[in-house]
Amino acid sequence: MKRLKILFASLLFLSALPLWRYLDMLAWFNLNGLFTVVSFFIWSSIFLILPISLIYRRVFIPGIILNICFSFLIYFFANPFSSHSVDYPEERHCSLLNFAGFFYNFKSILPSAHEDDLLIRNQICWARKLSLSIPDELSKHESSVYLKLVEEKLALPELKWKTTLPFLVPIYLKISKVDPIVDTVEAQKFWNNHYTAEIQIRDYNFMSYPHSDYIKWEYRLLEKYWSEFLDNVEITRNPEE
């Protein structure tokens, strides 16, 4: 029985990091703060406190109490993004509560696939922060300034990945105020001119396995459905073709 408990606890521990990684999406989509706190509470209770309590029974109740207190602190004081300025996209822009934000400062000592993954996810946080910082009403001059700012920042070699495209198009749509469908297609063409390096062509060594294969599958899936969406938009615009 004890061995089964240890085995089950180990499986929960091993599942904690991958699921924490997916919780980053709560910040990307700017969901309600209460929803984020509840999600973190459930995650930490099941994948951190429960496996420890399977081995040490007395940990469960104090752990849940501490988790509740921590959740209140998150709700009232934590921010989904870092306080760093959007002027420097290479800085850490995900919160320390996020998987990407927590491990971002250690990216240089991690295998290359993990480093690429953290860079991409941090860029998504940067894109979301930038989109939230853009005023709702922009003059023609302000639009050109913001467009130039984003274009220059995205020209950095270490940030050139198509994988963040779905999060960058809303920035373009917010800056340029024309027809949304037309702008979506034009935004895709605009960002494609700058995003030439893709995760799929990277050659990782054995130290990155299996994370390297997983992120290639994950980002390939993202690009596949994004491309299909854009193709459908093109058909909607030109039904006679």
Image (spheres, rainbow, N blue to C red):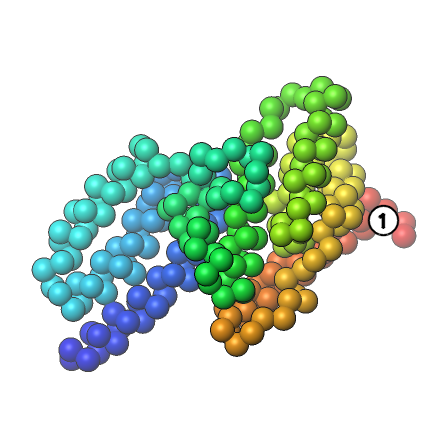
> The residue under label 1 is which amino acid type?
Pro
Which image quarter: residue 184?
A: top right
Q: Is residue 38 visible?
A: yes
Task: Measuring from the top left, give residue 132's x and y in whole percent.
Answer: 55, 32
Where does residue 20 sit, x and y in percent of width and height?
A: 39, 56
Q: Is residue 97 above or below residue 59?
A: above
* Outermost front residue: 109
Q: Classify residue 124 as left or right of residue 156.
A: left
The answer to whether residue 175 is above or below residue 241 is: above
Residue 83 occupies quadrant: top left
Q: Which residue is rendered at x = 48% and y = 44% of the image?
A: 92
Give the residue at the far right of this rendering.
241
Crowd band around label 1 with a 10 angstrom C-alpha radius: few (<14), some (14–19), many (20+): few
Point out the image quarter for the N terminus.
bottom left
* Viewer-closest of 40 and 80: 80
In the rendered view, does 168 fall on the left or right side of 205?
A: right
Is residue 31 in sight in this rendering? no
Count of picture labels: 1
Q: Nearer the viewer, residue 167 or 236?
A: 167
Q: Return the residue nearer the eye: 222 or 14.
A: 14
Secondary element under disc 1, as helix, strand or loop, is loop
Is 56 drawn above or below residue 40 in the view shown? below
Residue at which label 1 appears: 239
Q: Residue at x 61, y 45 (%)?
A: 167
Residue at 56%, 59% (x, y): give it.
Answer: 116
Q: Quadrant of residue 170?
A: top right
Point out residue 97 in the picture as x, y percentages from the top left corner: 37, 46
Residue shown at the point (75%, 21%) measured from the top left: 140
- Give how far across and how far down residue 90 sits, in percent: 56, 44
